[in-house]
Image (tube, grey):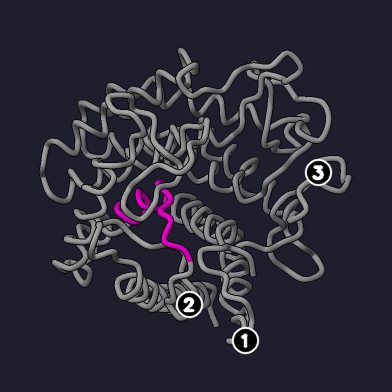
């Protein structure tokens, strides 16, 4: 057999394998969307129930703002990008969820600070001193605008985005997070990571907003890359505000899933900017490095937390295998493969996908997990 014929056969086999995985993931997506459409819609107050058992039974009617925003975003993105999800029921639910957020998410309007969790009818229960409820609120509003064309949603998204940027880069006092004398000034990777995601979200097919947030996107990318420490041999979850390693357990903390998520955010950013050198750097340091350090060599799967010096992590759940890091890994490796054609990245996608889809589902007699993410 000639080398050319063998190469063509290998490529055809690869296409068939990828198509099979695409179909399998599509089937899972259909099943998941059907579950949420059947069980999560609050027809009385709007918004969504998220504390659901595997059979759809509601066990708590509290509404977490970031999950409300995530579901609005997902419904809108599916509605406008997939023909099979172009359904009135999906759009109506997304709009009802968006209106619920507009009415109740902000704790004390005109302040932009959002609650972390609300009662079923929208009364605030808890506020966190972070930016993440607001980030998912922004994503929801931007997708609602893109799907409905209603300018008020975009206005809300941009106003909230500008408030988030103000908190992060200028004055965080409104978040209610005092700097105590003994506490180090810490930058968690999640902050620039989420901001970079919002830059990509708001700038999609919008030259005006893409230009407005271009400098912010580059700033986020630089801040994320500061978390690659120890001469490029470790990705640390927390660093000092000037990009140095912190002492103690906080400084040694690693989260492989977060690193992979930040990796594909960065990869998307540098693909758009057309920077092959930085794309290769991201693949090496924020895809391959956290994956190989975070993968369990004995049982498979990605650990939740690790310690860079191999001490026992302080998080008691450190050894759990959660669904979301594996989802981030699959996205990251497929994106990297699509950009570079590197077969090693495709092999790693297969490795993660086979592990993820082959886990045994919990038995019916086991406790319901709801929106918990552990296996």
**What element does badge 3 sit on?**
strand
**Which residue is located at x 51 percent, y 35 percent?**
128
Who comes first in sequence, dot 2 or dot 1? 2
Q: Is residue 170 left or right of residue 30?
A: right
Instruction: For marks 2 and 1, give the one nearer the viewer.
Output: 1
Q: Position of residue 259 (x, y in %)?
A: 61, 44
Q: Tell which tag, 3 or 2, sits nearer the viewer.
A: 3
Check the image and report above or below for 16 versus 260: below
Residue 171 spot, x, y in % from top left: 47, 13
**Is disc 3 in contact with disc 1, using a CB cutoff of under 8 Å?**
no
Which secondary structure class fits the magenta region best?
helix
How packed mark 3 is, by other alpha carbons closer than 10 Å (few <14, some 14-19, many 20 or more), is some
Magenta region, residue range: 60-73
At numbered mark 1, what does the secondary structure look like: helix, strand or loop?
Answer: loop
Rendering coords of residue 357 (x, y %): 56, 76
SS type, badge 2: helix
Which residue is farthest bottom? 364
Q: Is residue 25 left or right of residue 365?
A: left
262 relative to 83 in the view: left or right: right
Q: Work out how far the residue at label 2 is from the one at label 1, CA to CA, in angstroms.
A: 35 Å
Q: Mark 3 vs mark 1: which is more N-terminal?
A: 3
Q: CA distance from mark 3 to mark 2?
A: 36 Å
Which disc, if any, is residue 355? none
Q: Is residue 135 above or below residue 96?
A: above
**Residue pointed to by mark 3:** 307
Crowd tier of the residue under label 1, counting other residues whose Cα lies within 10 Å: few below 14, some 14–19, many 20 or above: few
Classed neighbour count for the residue bearing mark 2: other residues with Cα under 10 Å, few (<14), some (14–19), many (≥20):
few
Check residue 17 in the rendering and tell me which mark sits there, or answer none.
2
- Residue 365 disc label: 1
The foreground one among 135 and 298 is: 135
């Amino acid at each position: 057999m000639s080398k050319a014929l063998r190469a063509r056969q290998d490529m055809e086999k690869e296409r068939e394998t990828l198509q099979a995985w695409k179909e399998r993931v599509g089937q899972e997506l259909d099943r998941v969307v059907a579950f949420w459409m059947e069980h999560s819609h609050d027809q009385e107050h709007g918004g969504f129930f998220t504390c659901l058992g595997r059979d759809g039974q509601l066990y708590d009617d509290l509404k977490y703002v970031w999950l409300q925003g995530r579901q609005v975003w997902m419904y809108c993105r599916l509605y406008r990008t997939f023909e099979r999800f172009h359904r009135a029921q999906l759009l109506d639910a997304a709009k009802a969820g968006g209106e619920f957020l507009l009415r109740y998410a902000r704790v004390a309007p005109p302040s932009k600070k959002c609650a972390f969790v609300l009662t079923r009818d929208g009364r605030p229960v808890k506020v966190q001193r972070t930016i993440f409820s607001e980030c998912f609120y922004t994503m929801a509003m931007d997708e609602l605008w893109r799907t409905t064309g209603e300018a008020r949603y975009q206005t809300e998204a941009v106003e909230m985005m500008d408030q988030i940027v103000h908190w992060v880069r200028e004055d965080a006092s409104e978040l209610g997070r005092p700097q105590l004398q003994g506490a180090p000034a810490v930058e968690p990777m999640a902050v620039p990571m989420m901001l970079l995601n919002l830059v990509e979200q708001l700038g999609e097919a919008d030259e005006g907003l893409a230009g407005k947030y271009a400098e912010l996107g580059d700033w986020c990318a630089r801040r994320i890359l500061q978390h690659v420490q120890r001469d490029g041999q470790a990705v640390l979850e927390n660093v000092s505000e000037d990009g140095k390693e912190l002492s103690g357990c906080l400084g040694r903390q690693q989260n492989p899933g977060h690193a992979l998520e930040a990796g594909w955010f960065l990869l998307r950013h540098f693909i758009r900017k057309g920077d092959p050198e930085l794309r290769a750097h991201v693949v090496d340091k924020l895809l391959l490095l956290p994956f190989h350090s975070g993968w369990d060599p004995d049982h498979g799967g990605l650990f939740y937390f690790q310690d860079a010096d191999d001490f026992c992590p302080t998080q008691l759940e450190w050894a759990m295998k959660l669904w979301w890091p594996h989802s981030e890994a699959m996205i990251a490796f497929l994106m990297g493969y699509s950009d570079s054609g590197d077969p090693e990245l495709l092999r790693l996608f297969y490795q993660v996908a086979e592990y993820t889809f082959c886990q045994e589902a919990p038995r019916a007699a086991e406790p319901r997990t709801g929106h918990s993410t552990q296996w």
